[in-house]
Amino acid sequence: DAGVIQSPRHEVTEMGQEVTLRCKPISGHNSLFWYRQTMMRGLELLIYFNNNVPIDDSGMPEDRFSAKMPNASFSTLKIQPSEPRDSAVYFCASSPDLAYNNEQFFGPGTRLTVL
Amino acid sequence: AQSVSQHNHHVILSEAASLELGCNYSYGGTVNLFWYVQYPGQHLQLLLKYFSGDPLVKGIKGFEAEFIKSKFSFNLRKPSVQWSDTAEYFCAVNAILTGGGNKLTFGTGTQLKVEL
C-alpha cells in the first residue's frame, strides 16, 4: 500500500492567492482528517470526514478555509485568499473508521509558505 | 474538553542515556493513548498505543510507555537512546465523548536531540 498521498509536497505562493492541497487516503479507509502543524500551535485538527461526509469542522480557522471530499479516494483543503499566517505544514491522515481505538495514518504533509 | 500536556519541549541527550518524556492528559472518561514520532522531514508514525489491559505498553524500536490512570499520565521511556532517535515525539489522547464519537487530541510535541 502506498500510504496516504499528499500533493504538492511544497507550495510557495503570494498573499491573496488561492491554494489547494490534495490528499488521497489509504484505500479502504473511511475516515479522513486534515491537520495543521505550526511551531506556535503544534498539531491542530482542522476538519474530519467519515464516509465522505464532514463530521466536525470546528477546527477550521476561518471562512477562508474550506475542505471537500467528493469521493472515498480524494479530498481537498482550499485556502482562499491565503495569508502569511497560513504558512504551516498541512497533514492529511486516514483511518479505517471513527472507532476510538483506531490508529491514524499520516501522509508526508504539504509545507505551505505564503509570502 | 480534553487536553494533553507534554512538559518537555526540547530534550538533549547523549547516546546510551535513558529517556523519559512526560505526557499528562485531562479527561475524566475513557481514553485511548498514543505516542507518535516524527523524524526530520518525515510524517508522523505510530510508536505505540494503549487501549486496555497491561498498562505497560511496548512499542517499536525499544520504546515503551506506562499508563498511570491515577496520575492521568502516559510517559514514554527508552532505556538507551540512539542517534537515530532524534525526532519530535507527540503524545495523543483519543477520548470517548459523552455525546458519542471520539476526538484525537495531540500534545505540542517534544523535540529530542541525541548527540554522539
Image (cartoon, coloured by chain):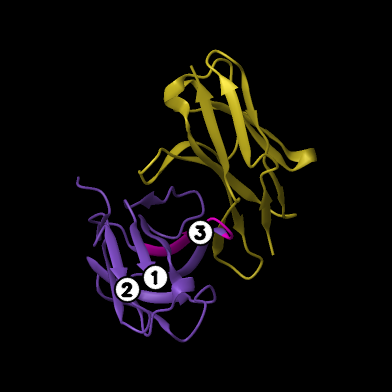
Chain colours: A purple, B yellow
The reply to the same-chain question for discs 2 and 1 is yes
- Picture layout, residue A15 above or below residue A39: below
- The amino acid type found where label 1 is placed reads Phe
- Picture layout, residue A106 above or below residue A32: above
Q: Which picture quadrant has residue A39?
A: bottom right
- Which label belongs to residue A49? 1
- Picture layout, residue A56 above or below residue A95: below
Please name which of the two marks, 3 or 1, marks the residue nearer to the observer.
3
- The amino acid type found where label 2 is placed reads Asn
Q: Which picture quadrant has residue B64?
A: top right
Q: Secondary structure at mark 1?
A: strand
Residue labelled with disc 3: A38
Q: Which picture quadrant has residue B56?
A: top right
The part of the chain drawn in magenta is: A32-41
Badge 1 density bin: few <14, some 14–19, many ≥20, Cα 10 Å: many
Residue labelled with disc 2: A52
* Residue placed furthest toward the left: A1
The reply to the same-chain question for discs 3 and 1 is yes
Quarter placement of the C terminus of chain A: bottom left
In primary-sequence order, the first of circles 3 and 1 is 3
Whether pointer 2 and pointer 1 mark residues with C-beta atoms closer than 8 Å, the reply is yes
Badge 2 density bin: few <14, some 14–19, many ≥20, Cα 10 Å: some
Please name which of the two marks, 3 or 2, marks the residue nearer to the observer.
3
Position of residue A60 measured from the top left corner of the image (x, y, whole percent)? 49, 76
**Residue located at (52% from left, 62% from top):** A44
Residue A18 in the figure: left or right of residue B73: left
- The amino acid type found where label 3 is placed reads Thr
